[in-house]
Image: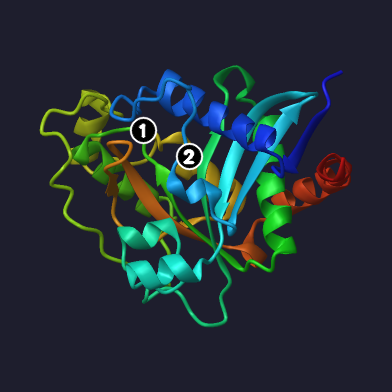
Amino acid sequence: MTCMHWRVATTQREIDDAARIRWAVFGGELGLLSGQPSTSRREVTSLDTLDTTVHVVVYADTEPVATVRLLLPNPEMAASLGGTVGIDLEQRVDLSGVIRPEMVIAEPSRFCVLESWRRADVVTCLQAGMYVESLRRGVTHWIASANLDTDSREDALLSWQVAASRGWLSPHWRVSVPDPWQAPSQPRSPFYTPEERAKAEQGALDGLRMPRAPALFARSLGARFIAEPLFDTYFQWFTLPLIITLNEVPVDSVARFLALENAARPADQA
């Protein structure tokens, strides 16, 4: 029987495991790294080595199968960006109207699972690691931006409308995003079919699909979306900015995460 467990990367090998998973998903499977050549087949940025960056990796026995990066507040980045807390999203979105002094913010990013391991227990294990480690560090809110699986402005805006129809927009916060002038005029990766767009034009949003990442975060973590779609120039992909209040994560999800904690702790201390 496969032993599934998560751990915080503390060695070069474990951080390398995270970078390899990221390349396999974003570069190999999704083809989003064509402008980011890497002969080593690792997806790495300058944020990965900050002392405020935490990499969580899920292992199936000894095989690394999933990872997420947590960016904690970084005063050096905040000073450089003129931001509030110093997370990556502040480079693209003004979060000053969202972040309050009593909040402890972390930005989950690079949430990915190898395609052959994309199943419920692996995803839950990865979310559990992200949740438990964030609580341990006193985090109260996650602010992030979820992949919309498209470079089409039309489809990204339709996803935003579907999220609104499901009650997934934040009732408290709304931020502005820059005009996505860098988005392609001829998208290479549409998300919705012509039939789905026709239904939307008639106001029939019920039954329309939501991209996997925002739907997952809304359902299992209680995410609420705080902005219209944001074009990510690194991946050339639209994303949907969101906020998650950790003490409002659904109770059934918290129960699953805490049930995995005892399995995760020994792995993290091994």
* Horizontal side of residue 206 vs 111, given as left or right: left
Q: Residue at x 54, y 55 (%)?
A: 50
Where residue 259 appears, as percent x and y from the top left, is 84, 46
Q: Is residue 179 left or right of residue 214?
A: left
The residue at 71%/62% (across/down) is: 135
The crowding category of the residue bearing disc 1, from other C-alpha atoms within 10 Å (few below 14, some 14 to 19, many at least 20), is many
Q: Are marks 2 and 1 in contact (CB under 8 Å)?
A: yes
Residue 120 in the image: above or below residue 90: above
SS assignment at label 1? loop
Number of callouts in the render? 2
User: Which kind of residue does numbered mark 1 sit on?
Assistant: Asp
Vertical position of residue 179 compared to residue 97: above or below: above
The circle on residue 213 is 2
Coordinates of residue 117 in the picture (x, y in percent): 64, 21
Disc 2 crowd, CA 10 A, few/some/many (<14, 14-19, 20+): some
Nearer to us in this view, 101 or 8: 8
Query: Which corner quadrant holds the C terminus?
Result: top right
Three-letter code for the amino acid on which mark 2 is drawn: Ala
On the image, numbered disc 1 is attached to which residue?
149
Question: Visible in this render: residue 95?
Answer: no
